[in-house]
Image (cartoon, rainbow, N blue to C red):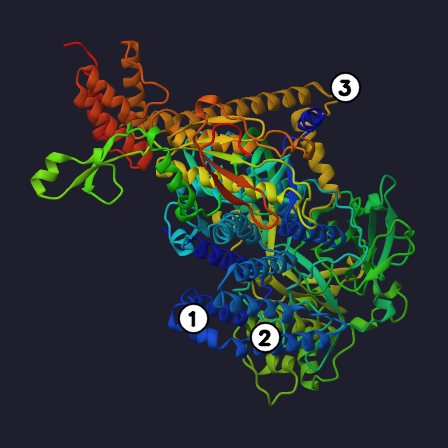
């Protein structure tokens, strides 16, 4: 392939890779990406000597004007976005410039600008990327950047240096740069192989730098910037019919949890069944009005938390206590012993809620990693709901002077849950007057018809449990589950529409109906949003919860049993197992999030400890015997792997030589043409017979002397000399069959007949 | 002392030199800024890109070193170099590596450990191959010109830094005097008359070249009678060299009593040396046997290219005699050569001039 074409191709691939990486990070709008892609395809054909190129050259003033206008617009848009600065208009501007430069690439300067703009695009992708796809794009980018920068450098050297060729006494003659740029001999397969290896090493080096640089989290200027993650639609209110429409196609991962108790289940089926029945409790609402659930923020509903500091580090444990169970909160040990332990990793949430299996009794927040400038903590909300807060860590501030940050990104914490929570409540008669009134408040927007229905369903029931049973049975008998919602707008309240006019709805409707009917029947209830079930990932031994598992249910107060979950939604079967491929993808994403996106000083320490343990660098003398043996075995394996790698390298070094010999003498010693070897052997043989070539003698002079001296088979020597001279001075490759023939003829040269 | 200095300099010379290019400075600046942003913001993927930039810098250093390794650089000089006349210096680079080609190589000649302003560029030297290119150079003065070595440098692969190594390749160039245009008319005005007078000394030892028609003034002994009889016209034999004619170029190498008020005081002498060299070459080309006489030396007359190189070598090294010696005898001719023609090259304030002398029996006036 011509040098010019290779350079152009790699440049385009570089820009394309940067663009694809950006697309994988969901940073730029698809419209911008499509427009840019169209411009890039068009620009491929925009050479200076083409009609399109001429047209674009004439349009340069217009394009410059458009560039200025685009820039002004971007500045205006960014200025308007204050104080929540949105830099995406600048990214669009960079894409515009990149497309423009691709269309107007006329010289080295344009190519250089293309590379700089591609790099900016890559930076933007790195700034926002959360997907593991980034690493694929990054590897390709490193590979292409290595090739492109080398080719760019060579091209510039050609254009700057390959201008004058001196011949004899004549004045310097200009060499056509085009001829060199169109050459197919400048770079070839070996060039890409060797430089590709360099790129792989650069990639590995980048990974080492990534892992090794201490995460000190200075935050000098920006105060530490964290990416904003967030997809799931949890908010401060739930509007029936407007929000919460389930999308079974939304595969966004919300959280991942490792639950040792579930991991220990031996049977896959049993585990899947267990996972399918897991309720991940999130937001809780106590007030319904006009088809909307909100929080009353009544102090009587405030979540009670007891904080326990870890004596060994800055870890915090929060123990939840029910407001409806006055008295001293349970101790930390009492709360967590026997509870289901979960290590939860929040992946994507817009509304920072601490999710945990129903019902959470304690949360352990890990200490901020060494060098981190942010940490996550818990704040008490209402009705047993827990919020997550991010705050800035400063070595100069005490624990009581934490600056809470407005934004929130991923977090990891450990939760403990227990179901049922025996003794979590008291009989209503023993509670303070009005303690449960927020959970008994009926909606004013509902007509008396709803109350009549509730009374009809719950009348003559002995206790709250019987009332719950009656309501749930009625709902499941009269309504079906659907996500294809219908709405009669003549009925103002969607819940009333669901109860009396629609025969189907989804979980929000079932939960809302159950909550309202039970309240009207005298049972305190609250509305809960969360997730139901999950997918087991055997590779990572974790449960993945996606957005399509969002669910709503009700909690009803049952005296001394406290708050009990009531799920009125008819059961819908959902797959709880991931395919192998999805398990791998999920494991990669989990690894990516944990070890790349959220890589911190604590993980650096962990990594260093693991490495030192694996290789025995810091093996303590008093280590247990088994551990010592394991480390030794690792060392042996390491040494063996190193030896195999060395042997492989040497074998690879030898391989081309052997292949050369087999493939018919195309190349001889030291990579020289084989004809050199044949000629030199002939000279050596003649020298041994007392007819050596003099140092100042040319091959042809030596041949003439040989003829004069009557050397045997001089014609063969003449043939050999001609071929050698052509190869040596004319750079003409001698075919291998000719070399073999010459070698046969050369055997007779100088030999006495 | 100078030799010791040069030796010391060679001893303490670093094996490689590095110089950041403009692009390299920008690259490092961008790397540092990005590193700061990554540390400040705690954005992990920026650390990855920061690592990539650092490793590209490292790869730049390693690959440029690999490019410079196992290279054999040789200089090829022309046979004759005249001052103020462009000549080509060939530089051959052999890549002794087995597999890896060398890209983007520059070689500069060095004088007193400093590179000259011209360089040779090699886009690609394949493994095990040699490539030669040349650069054009003009030296202003005659004499010995010393080259200390060669500087081999490369900006491969990314152009971020220029790595170079110095190769010891000492060489001495003998630069002949500059040549001036000397027409035959200038010389023939005086010499033709002298030639006639020294015809007794003329010999015809040159090789036969061809026949031509007789012209007035030709030696009747050269008539080729057989051809003349056959064609009906007289034809004479021509010989390759008219070696019968002998002339001595005598250079006025004394320092003038009144040097020029402005400019280089040695300029008249240098101009005279150039004229002497030019005249001697023209005469040799015309077939004369040419000798050279300066104040301190005499070169016996002789024909051909070898004599030309002797005369040029002598003139390349001749120096101006101090004014105190100017009154002494100028040219000493061996007794056997007395009576031959002498072409005197005299210094002049504006330009040197030529004078012809009749054959003399003693010292020239």
Q: Residue at x 66, y 65 (%)?
A: A553
Classed neighbour count for the residue bearing mark 3: other residues with Cα under 10 Å, few (<14), some (14–19), many (≥20): few
Foreground residue, A603 or A333? A603
The residue singled out by tag 2 in the image is A67
Disc 2, SS: helix
Asked if the residue under mark 1 is in contact with the one under mark 3, i.e. CB atoms within 8 Å, the reply is: no
Foreground residue, A202 or B194? B194
For the residues labelled 3 and 1, the Cα–Cα distance comes to: 75 Å
Q: On the rendered structure, is B286 left or right of A507?
A: left
Chain under label 2? A
**Counting residues from the N terminus, which is met first, the one under dot 3 or under dot 1?**
1
Q: Residue at x 71, y 34 (%)?
A: A608
Foreground residue, A65 or B86? B86
The answer to whether residue B107 is visible is no
Numbered badge on residue A53: 1
Residue B258 appears in which quarter of the rendering?
top right
* Viewport quadrant of the N terminus of chain B: top right
Chain under label 3? A
Numbered badge on residue A187: none
Q: Which of label 1 and label 2 is nearer to you? A: 1
The residue singled out by tag 3 in the image is A622
Q: Which of label 3 and label 1 is nearer to you? A: 1
Disc 3, SS: loop
Q: On the rendered structure, is A691 left or right of B290?
A: left
Asked if the residue under mark 2 is in contact with the one under mark 3, i.e. CB atoms within 8 Å, the reply is: no
Disc 1, SS: helix
């Amino acid at each position: 392939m011509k040098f010019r074409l290779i350079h152009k191709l790699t440049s385009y691939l570089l820009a394309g890779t940067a663009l694809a990486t950006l697309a994988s990070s969901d940073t730029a709008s698809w419209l911008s990406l499509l427009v840019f892609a169209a411009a890039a395809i068009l620009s491929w054909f925009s050479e200076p000597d083409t009609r399109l190129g001429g047209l674009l050259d004439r349009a340069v003033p217009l394009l410059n004007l458009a560039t200025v206008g685009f820039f002004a617009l971007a500045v205006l848009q960014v200025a308007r976005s204050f104080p929540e600065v949105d830099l995406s208009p600048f990214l669009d501007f960079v894409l515009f410039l990149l497309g423009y430069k691709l269309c107007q690439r006329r010289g080295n300067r344009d190519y250089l600008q293309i590379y700089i703009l591609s790099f900016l695009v890559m930076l933007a992708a790195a700034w926002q990327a959360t997907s593991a796809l980034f690493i694929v794009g990054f590897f390709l980018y490193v590979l292409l950047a290595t090739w492109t920068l080398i080719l760019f450098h060579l091209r510039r050297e050609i254009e700057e240096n390959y201008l004058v060729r001196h011949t004899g006494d004549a004045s310097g003659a200009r060499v056509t740069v085009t001829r060199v740029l169109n050459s197919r001999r400048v770079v070839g397969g070996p060039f890409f192989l060797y430089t590709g290896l360099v790129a792989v090493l650069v990639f590995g080096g980048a990974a080492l730098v990534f892992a090794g640089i201490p995460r000190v989290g200075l935050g000098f200027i920006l105060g530490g910037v964290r990416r904003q993650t967030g997809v799931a639609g949890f908010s401060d209110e739930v509007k029936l019919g407007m929000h919460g429409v389930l999308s079974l196609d939304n595969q966004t991962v919300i959280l991942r949890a490792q639950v040792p108790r579930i991991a220990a289940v031996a049977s896959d089926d049993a585990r899947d069944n267990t996972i399918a029945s897991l309720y991940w409790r999130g937001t809780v609402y106590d007030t319904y009005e006009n088809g909307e659930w909100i929080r009353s923020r009544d102090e009587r509903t405030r979540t009670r938390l007891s904080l326990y500091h870890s004596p060994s580090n800055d870890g915090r444990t929060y123990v939840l206590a029910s407001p409806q169970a006055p008295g001293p909160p349970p101790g930390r040990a009492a709360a967590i012993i026997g509870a289901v332990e979960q290590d939860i990793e929040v992946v994507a949430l817009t509304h920072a809620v601490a999710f945990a299996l129903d019902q959470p009794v304690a949360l352990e927040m890990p200490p901020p990693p060494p060098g981190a400038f942010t940490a996550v903590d818990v704040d008490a909300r209402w009705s047993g709901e827990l919020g997550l807060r991010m705050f800035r860590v400063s070595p100069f501030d005490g624990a009581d002077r934490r600056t809470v940050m407005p934004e929130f990104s991923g977090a990891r914490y450990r939760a403990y849950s227990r179901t049922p929570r025996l003794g979590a409540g008291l009989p209503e008669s023993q509670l303070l007057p009005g303690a449960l009134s927020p959970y008994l408040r009926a909606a004013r927007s509902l007509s008396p018809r709803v109350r009549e229905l509730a009374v009809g369903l719950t009348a003559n029931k002995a206790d709250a449990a019987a009332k719950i049973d009656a309501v749930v049975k009625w709902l499941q008998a009269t309504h079906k589950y659907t996500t294809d919602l219908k709405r009669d707008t003549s009925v103002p309240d969607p819940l009333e529409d669901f109860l009396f006019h629609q025969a189907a709805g989804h979980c929000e409707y079932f939960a809302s109906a159950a909550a309202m009917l039970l309240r009207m029947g005298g049972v305190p209830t609250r509305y809960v949003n969360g997730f139901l079930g999950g997918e087991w990932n055997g590779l990572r031994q974790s449960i993945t919860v996606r957005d399509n598992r969002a669910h709503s249910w009700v909690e009803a107060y049952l005296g001394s049993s406290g708050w009990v979950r009531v799920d009125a939604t008819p059961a819908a079967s959902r797959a709880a197992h991931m395919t192998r491929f999805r398990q791998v993808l999920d494991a990669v994403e989990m690894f990516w999030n944990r070890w790349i996106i959220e890589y911190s000083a604590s993980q650096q320490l962990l990594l260093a400890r693991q490495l030192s343990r694996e290789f025995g660098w810091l093996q303590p003398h008093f280590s247990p015997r088994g551990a010592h043996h394991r480390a030794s075995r690792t060392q042996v394996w390491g040494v063996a792997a190193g030896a195999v790698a060395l042997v492989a390298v040497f074998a690879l070094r030898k391989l081309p030589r052997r292949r050369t010999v087999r493939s018919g003498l195309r190349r001889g010693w030291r990579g020289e043409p084989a004809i050199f070897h044949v000629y030199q052997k002939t000279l050596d043989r003649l020298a041994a017979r007392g007819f050596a070539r003099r140092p100042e003698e040319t091959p042809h002079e030596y041949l003439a002397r040989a003829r004069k001296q009557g050397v045997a088979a001089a014609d063969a020597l003449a043939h050999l000399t001609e071929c050698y001279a052509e190869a040596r001075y004319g750079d003409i490759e001698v075919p291998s069959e000719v070399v073999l023939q010459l070698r046969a003829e050369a055997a007779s040269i100088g030999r006495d007949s | 002392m100078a030799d010791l200095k040069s030796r010391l300099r060679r001893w303490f010379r670093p094996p490689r030199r590095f110089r950041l290019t403009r692009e390299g400075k920008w690259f490092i600046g961008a790397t540092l800024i990005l590193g700061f942003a990554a540390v400040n913001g705690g954005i992990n993927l920026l650390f990855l890109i920061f690592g990539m930039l650092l490793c590209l810098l490292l790869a730049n250093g390693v690959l440029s070193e690999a490019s410079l390794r196992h290279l054999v650089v040789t200089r090829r000089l022309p046979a004759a170099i005249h001052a103020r006349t462009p000549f080509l210096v060939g530089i051959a680079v052999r890549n002794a590596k087995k597999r890896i080609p060398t890209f983007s190589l520059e070689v500069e000649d060095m004088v007193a450990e400093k590179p000259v302003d011209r360089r040779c560029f090699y886009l690609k030297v394949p493994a095990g191959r040699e490539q030669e290119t040349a650069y054009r150079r003009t030296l202003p003065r005659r004499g010995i010109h010393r080259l200390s070595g060669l500087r081999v440098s490369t900006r491969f692969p990314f152009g971020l830094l220029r790595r170079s190594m110095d190769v010891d390749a000492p060489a001495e160039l003998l630069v002949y005097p500059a040549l001036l245009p000397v027409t035959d008319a200038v010389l023939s005005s005086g010499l033709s008359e002298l030639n006639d007078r020294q015809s007794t000394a003329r010999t015809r030892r040159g090789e036969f070249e061809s026949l031509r028609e007789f012209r007035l003034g030709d030696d009747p002994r050269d008539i080729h009678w057989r051809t003349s009889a056959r064609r009906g016209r007289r034809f004479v034999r021509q010989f390759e060299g008219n070696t019968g004619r002998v002339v001595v170029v005598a250079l006025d190498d004394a320092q003038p009593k009144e040097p020029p008020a402005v400019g280089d005081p040695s300029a008249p002498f240098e101009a005279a040396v150039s004229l002497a060299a030019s005249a001697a070459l023209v005469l040799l080309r015309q077939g004369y046997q040419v000798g050279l006489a300066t104040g301190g030396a005499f070169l016996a007359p002789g024909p051909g290219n070898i004599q030309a190189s002797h005369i040029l070598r002598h003139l390349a090294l001749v120096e101006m005699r101090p004014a105190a010696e100017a009154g002494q005898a100028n040219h000493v001719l061996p007794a056997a050569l007395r009576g031959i023609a002498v072409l005197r090259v005299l210094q002049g304030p504006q330009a040197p001039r030529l004078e012809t002398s009749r054959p003399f029996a003693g010292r020239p006036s």
